[in-house]
């Protein structure tokens, strides 16, 4: 009997394993549940489905009512919610049952789904709520629609695939942050943001409410904070280094949340089991506050809210006046936000104003503080004492470690993980949010193909790969890692569309990092659930990046002076069947040719690519494009007159391989730089008619790349004796927008095998630029001969 049972189990196990791998798409829950046992069959939610709630549990009733309301709004299917212990009701049933064991913790749940019964078990309302989010992701995406998308005669039943799930989170702190200072986002958006967090079982919203560029929360005692501090005169245009000199839009910008709105957001979040952590920045990033109350600075001012990005020297002065002010502000803030944590910033506080302040120097002497770091520590300790005295806890960026960590502080580790490690070893709680894994203002694809971002690279796979608990921590210290958070700084994110693009799908990967067990973590498997995530986001009218589908074209020169364009190697999403392309500038469609291996170009062209699943487009069709250059120089060897400061461009023929440079944010890829002049001699292989050259030069004066002042071309048949073809002054304008400038140089047609091009540097960056007088560099892209 025992043996037969055992054999049966093995058989069943194999069956399930097989069917699971074949029907993975039935279960596309993100974050991946700790345990999911698939089953055949499905539960149908219809007009006769009843949701049974045990009596006397108002919080469970609220969870059930919300689910029923959402489902009804999206599909018209009306669940009956009944408070009863009895099962004797007609039709199929979803029942909520309080868990009798402790295995599920506060947030865990079990779901057992069969053809006519769904049983949900949890210890707390949080767990029931997360069970419902799992059910919502098991339903067809239409079940998530904000409004009814189907006609009355449409769907009358909704299928939930049968399975058994037991789930609970890996970390207690699962956060998403939002900077509303650099750009302001309205309450309606904040609510949708919280909805999406909750759907992915993220339980903490870190609301970055104050910074140099705007104070965004009403404080009754200090009305000027929002009357004055919520407004800036204008805003920087483009990327920080894009224009030289910098350009501003001339448009006043402002916005803030009233206390009523804040209460509304907190209420909304609470009902979705999301805690809001407000951040009031101190002692740095304080310009907006100082614009309203200049007496809180060390120097008299006046100050105004910053109109560009960065770190500014004027910060709160550690006077009694400042402490009273901050305590008053924090008192109002604690009245609005019931959560345990109050974020007090603490990052990027320059010490120059304190160094120059006689008051600060005297204070340091009086308090026995040996340097300004200890003064910052004194500042934070006083705030810690105040906040802790009110029964709350401070959390701050990892700079609060410098000069000594305040006794009750929790540390948010953003400059890598070092600060987090150190704090955990000091037995302080830690939230991990290192830039290399958690900063969603960084690029998720090729910067040249992406909208302007801050800089840095953070593809989806890298977010997913993050393990917030460093292996080098002892098990006891590792307990201090409370969890992980994704940050969205909005310098380059002016609107909701762009914000959603930067957040999704990366926040979903982070949700899985925060919730799902380390065991079973597998990016390939995760990426197979991403298309369903995209379907869900689309139904919810949420923008998302499809950068995982981007096929970035690259070229190499081949025989016959042509270039072969192929797709940059890398992992491809499983559902991609074809990469289609165009070379006539048109947007790829299902009719465009498929790029099998490479496409040969015999003339300069812009290649556009897009990924398809059959005829269904997966990419953003009008996105990926890159120009490739073909000329008489293509694939030809060349020598350099002066060494390059970046690599050996002569070795791989990068000046004549057809690849053009790409630019995005701070990044410039594929340019060869020279400290002084640039000179090259191209060997065309045999004598032939030539009548001009064209060379791409980088104009990026903020990084000291200037255009050349003069270009000299000479030609030769033997490579020894050169005769001048032309010398031209470029009269190039250095100011303006960063750009790749392709300078065409024509001369009278002649016959030659060798073409020599020399570009003379202007020497130093001209006056009026960001760095006048600095040594100018030349940045060279493709070299063409006509
Ligand atoms: C930060 O990114 N300055 C915390």
Image (cartoon, helix red, strand yellow):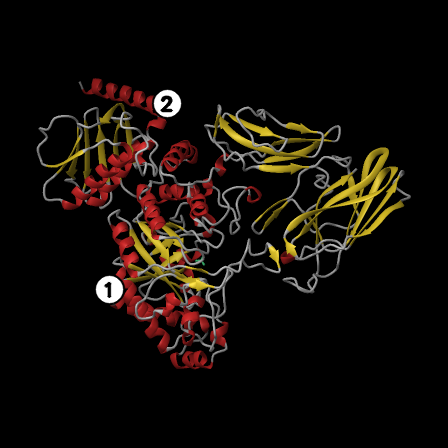
Distance from Cα at disc 1 to Cα at disc 2: 53 Å
Contact, mark 1 vs mark 2 (Cβ under 8 Å) = no
Q: Locate residue 773, reporting x and y percent.
A: 69, 65
Q: Residue at x 30, y 23 (%)?
A: 16
Q: Residue at x 29, y 53 (%)?
A: 265
Q: Judge left or right: residue 304 versus residue 279.
A: right
Q: Quadrant of residue 428?
A: bottom left
Nearer to me, 499 or 226: 226
Where 771 sits versus 652, above or below? below
Note whether residue 212 is visible: no
Q: Locate residue 231, reporting x and y percent.
A: 43, 63
Where 703 sits versus 681, above or below? below
Note whether residue 252 is visible: yes
Determine which of the numbered discs, if any, sits on residue 597 in the image.
none
- Label 2 sits on a secondary structure element that is helix
Q: Judge left or right: residue 715 versus residue 280.
A: right
The quarter of the rendered structure image containing the C terminus is top right
Q: Locate residue 561, reporting x and y percent.
A: 75, 31
Q: Residue at x 49, y 76 (%)?
A: 355
- Label 1 sits on a secondary structure element that is loop
For label 2, the residue is 22
For ligand 1, tell me if the residue under mark 1 lies within 8 Å. Answer: no
For label 1, the residue is 391
Q: Judge left or right: residue 349 versus residue 65.
A: right
Where 572 sits versus 491, above or below? above
């Amino acid at each position: 009997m025992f043996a037969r049972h055992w054999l049966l189990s093995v058989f069943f196990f194999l069956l399930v394993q097989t069917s699971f791998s074949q029907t993975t798409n039935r279960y596309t829950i993100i974050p991946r549940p700790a345990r999911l046992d698939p089953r055949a069959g499905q539960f149908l939610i219809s007009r006769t489905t009843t949701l049974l709630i045990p009596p006397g549990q108002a919080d469970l009733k609220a969870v059930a009512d919300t689910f029923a309301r959402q489902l009804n709004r999206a599909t018209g299917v009306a669940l009956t919610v009944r408070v009863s212990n009895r099962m004797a009701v007609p039709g199929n049933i979803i029942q909520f049952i309080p868990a009798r064991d402790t295995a599920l913790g506060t947030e865990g749940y079990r779901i057992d789904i069969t053809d006519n019964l769904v049983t949900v078990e949890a210890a707390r309302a949080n767990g029931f709520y997360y069970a419902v989010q799992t059910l919502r992701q098991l339903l067809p995406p239409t079940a998530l629609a904000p409004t009814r998308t189907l006609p009355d005669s449409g769907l009358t039943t909704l299928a939930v695939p049968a399975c058994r799930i037991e789930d609970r989170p890996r970390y207690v702190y699962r956060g998403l942050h939002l900077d509303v200072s650099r750009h302001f986002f309205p309450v309606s958006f904040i609510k949708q943001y919280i909805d999406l967090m909750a759907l992915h079982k993220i339980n903490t919203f870190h609301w970055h409410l104050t910074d140099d560029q705007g104070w965004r929360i009403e404080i009754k005692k200090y009305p000027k904070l929002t009357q004055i501090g919520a407004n800036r005169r204008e805003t920087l245009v483009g990327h920080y280094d894009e224009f030289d000199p910098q350009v501003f839009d001339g448009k006043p910008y402002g916005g803030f949340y009233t206390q009523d709105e804040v209460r509304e957001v907190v209420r909304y979040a609470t009902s979705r089991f999301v805690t809001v952590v407000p951040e009031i920045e101190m002692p740095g990033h304080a310009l907006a506050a100082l614009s309203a109350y200049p007496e809180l600075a060390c120097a008299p001012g006046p100050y105004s809210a910053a109109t560009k990005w960065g770190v500014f020297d004027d910060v709160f002065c550690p006077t009694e006046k400042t402490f009273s002010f901050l305590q008053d502000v924090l008192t109002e803030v604690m009245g609005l936000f019931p959560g345990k944590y109050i974020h007090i910033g603490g990052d990027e506080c320059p010490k120059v104003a304190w160094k120059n302040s006689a008051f600060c120097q005297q204070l340091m002497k009086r308090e026995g503080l040996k340097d300004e770091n200890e003064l910052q520590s004194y500042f934070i300790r006083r705030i810690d004492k105040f906040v802790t005295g009110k029964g709350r806890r401070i959390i701050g960026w990892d700079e609060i470690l410098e000069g000594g960590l305040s006794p009750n502080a929790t540390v948010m580790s953003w400059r890598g993980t070092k600060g987090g490690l150190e704090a955990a070893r000091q037995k302080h709680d830690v939230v991990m949010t290192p830039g290399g894994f958690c900063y969603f203002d960084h690029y998720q694809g090729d910067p040249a193909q992406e909208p302007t971002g801050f800089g840095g690279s953070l593809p989806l796979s890298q977010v997913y790969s993050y393990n917030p608990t460093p292996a080098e921590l002892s098990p006891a210290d590792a307990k201090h890692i409370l969890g992980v958070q994704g940050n969205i700084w909005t310098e380059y994110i002016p609107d909701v569309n762009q914000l959603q693009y930067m957040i999704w799908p990366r926040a979903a990967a982070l949700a899985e990092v925060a919730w799902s067990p380390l065991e079973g973590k597998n990016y390939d498997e995760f990426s197979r659930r991403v298309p369903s995530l995209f379907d869900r986001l689309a139904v919810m009218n949420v923008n998302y990046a499809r950068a995982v589908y981007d096929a970035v074209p690259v070229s190499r020169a081949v025989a016959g002076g042509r270039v072969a364009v192929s797709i940059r190697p890398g992992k491809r999403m499983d559902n991609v069947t074809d990469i289609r392309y165009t070379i006539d500038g048109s947007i790829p469609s299902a009719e465009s040719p498929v790029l099998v291996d490479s496409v040969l170009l015999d003339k300069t062209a812009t290649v556009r690519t897009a990924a398809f699943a059959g005829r269904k487009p997966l990419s953003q069709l009008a996105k990926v494009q890159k120009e490739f250059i073909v000329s008489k120089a293509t694939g030809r060897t060349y020598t350099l007159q002066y060494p390059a400061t970046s690599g050996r461009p002569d070795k791989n023929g990068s000046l004549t391989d057809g690849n053009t440079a790409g630019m995005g944010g701070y990044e410039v890829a594929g340019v060869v730089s020279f400290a002084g002049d640039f000179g090259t001699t191209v060997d065309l292989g045999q004598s032939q008619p030539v009548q001009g050259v064209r060379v791409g030069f980088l104009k990026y004066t903020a990084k000291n790349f200037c255009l050349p002042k003069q270009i000299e071309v000479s030609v030769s048949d033997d490579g020894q004796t050169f005769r001048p073809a032309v010398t031209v002054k470029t009269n190039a304008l250095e100011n303006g927008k960063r750009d790749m400038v392709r300078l065409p140089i024509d001369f009278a047609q002649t016959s030659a095998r060798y073409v020599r091009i020399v570009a003379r540097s202007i020497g130093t960056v001209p006056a009026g630029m960001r760095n006048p007088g600095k040594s100018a560099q030349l940045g060279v892209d493709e070299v063409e001969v006509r």
